[in-house]
Image: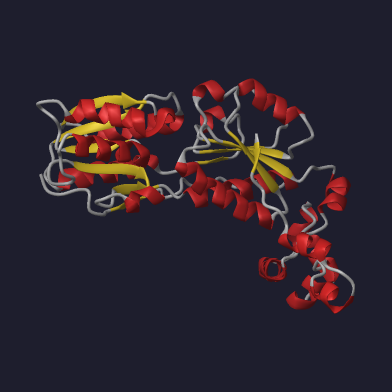
Amino acid sequence: MAAVSGTDPAGTAAAAGGSGRAGERSRRPTGRDVARVAGVSQATVSLVFSGTEAGHRVSAATRQRVLEAARDLGYRPQAAGRQLRLGRSGMALLAVPNLQGPFFGRVLAGVHEEAARHGLDVVVSSGWNAETLAEAATTSRFDGLLICSPDDSQLGPLPPGTPVVFLDADPADAGGAPTVELDLAGGMRAAVEHLTGLGHRRLGRLRSIHSAHTFRVRQAAFEQAARGLEVLELGVSLNLGESAARAAATELLGRPDRPRAVVCDDDVVASGLYQAAAELGLRIPADVSVVGIDNVAVAALLTPPLTTVDLPGEELGRAGVAALAGVLAGTAVPAVAPLPTALVVRASTTRA
């Protein structure tokens, strides 16, 4: 497991500060400072950062004012005392299937942003399976778990009462725990309809071979949207990165009856297809139109920029942590509607 939580700049400055006025300027901000800037009492500041159900008695407007003042001052509550009082570690585990997957960087950004609002630090790991995850749930190291886009082999029973939230996962596998989903089906429909709207009736498809809910939803939506079209389909291992994608794309585009438009299961696969097309002397989009899924940073940097389905990874991470904070506080967590996705049209597609 790799710790990804950053160091506390304010704490470093306070430790480095000496006596006199320089030391005063660099001292660690306190709850009293936050109360003064926010125009509230110290008791209100303590309630906001308490991590208990009592903190929810503070109005949303006041809570936001306190959090903004804390952020501006660089204030972080004294974690050790609060954690000892609550019997918690102040740590959450984010379990993702592949640390190298750029989409999970987007998820992690949202997780860290929201975790800071709730006084949580985050550890992220991809080296887990059902057994190690159950073991992590039984230790006191983590207050709760965030399980993102799990492969079927990584799912298994967790100890009763484990605080857990599932992200981009099948609610049927969550055992009643909160689940935050993406509207993957809507995104895939938009991708296929974009290509058919350009006159394409013969599509290529580079799909993930991994057994996971997220890819089953994408495949089912593609099959439904492409009904009545001719489809040439190849599987690719996303965990093997661009090399595997390039090999599969070379096979697909090297056929004498190659498709003139291809839908890829993520942007890394699409970038592998770009490489294969270049090696085969094919131009994008003149010879082959390409659509990806994820909208990670590389999508806009490819030449030409990639048309892709934006999956709101940051929002997924924020919603997951907000739900986990509710679970830890013992409050009812309302169901979250699937987060909307959107087709981002760039320059990698053209008319048939």
Residue 99 x/y as whole percent: 53, 37
Identify the image quadrant of residue 229: top left
Q: Residue at x 62, y 48 (%)?
A: 321
- 27 left or right of 316? right
For the N terminus, give its image quadrant: top right
Identify the image quadrant of residue 122: top right
Q: Residue at x 43, y 33 (%)?
A: 214
- 11 left or right of 218? right
Name the image colouring.
secondary structure
Residue 213 versus residue 334: which sits nearer the camera? Answer: 213
Identify the image quadrant of residue 238: top left
Task: Please say whether residue 120 is visible from this viewpoint.
Answer: yes
Residue 129, compared with residue 179, is above or below; it is above
Residue 284 x/y as whole percent: 18, 45
Count up the numbered dots.
0
Residue 163 x/y as whole percent: 69, 37
Q: Residue at x 68, y 70 (%)?
A: 72
- 166 left or right of 187? right
Task: Please say whether residue 341 is visible from this viewpoint.
Answer: no
Residue 126 versus residue 345: which sits nearer the camera? Answer: 126
Residue 107 x/y as whole percent: 52, 46
For the C terminus, give its image quadrant: top left
Residue 337, compared with residue 263, is above or below; it is below
Residue 131 versus residue 41: which sits nearer the camera? Answer: 131
